[in-house]
Image: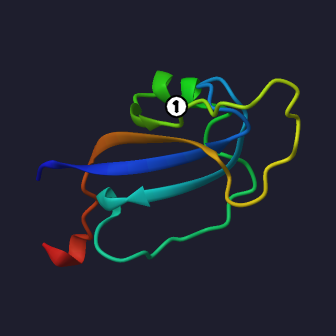
Amino acid sequence: MPDVQDVLVLFQTTPGLDAAVVAWSRYEASKGPGIKDLVEEEEPPYRNAIAAMRDGWQVIQMSEMKHRPPGDEAYEDGPLPYQTVLSRFNPMVTDDSEE
């Protein structure tokens, strides 16, 4: 069976690949159809994107640096502005009863 793509989205405090992860989402196609094991995780899977890259994840999208006027230290409202999207191919997990 061919490997399938899993995607990991890390939301960070800045656009840098070494920035701390504050939230994350996993999309694991390798686990088969449907979501059978959705769990709340207390800790992010990696401390930053560099750590994920060292574990075999490839960056497919990075946040761009936002231009701010000098002295603009205002807080931003809205969704988390900085994210790194990573991808890795893994073997499909098969249920023995399906074979």
Q: What residue type is labelled 1?
A: Ala
Tag 1: Cα neighbours inside 10 Å, few (<14), some, or many (≥20)? many
- Determine the secondary structure under disc 1: helix
- Residue ID at (49%, 21%): 54
x then y, percent, for residue 31:
34, 62
Residue, x 78% and y 57% (percent of image)? 77
The answer to which quarter of the image holds residue 92 is: bottom left
Near-viewer residue (89 or 24): 24
Left or right of 93 in this view: 38: right
Q: Name the residue under label 1.
A: 52
Look at the image and tell me in which quarter the C terminus lies.
Answer: bottom left
| Left or right placement of residue 83 versus residue 56 in this view | right
Count of residue discs: 1
Q: At 50% from the left edge and 71% from the top edge, which residue is drawn?
A: 37
The residue at 62%/36% (across/down) is 46
Vertically, is 83 above or below 36? above
In the depicted view, which residue is nearer to us: 79 or 28? 79
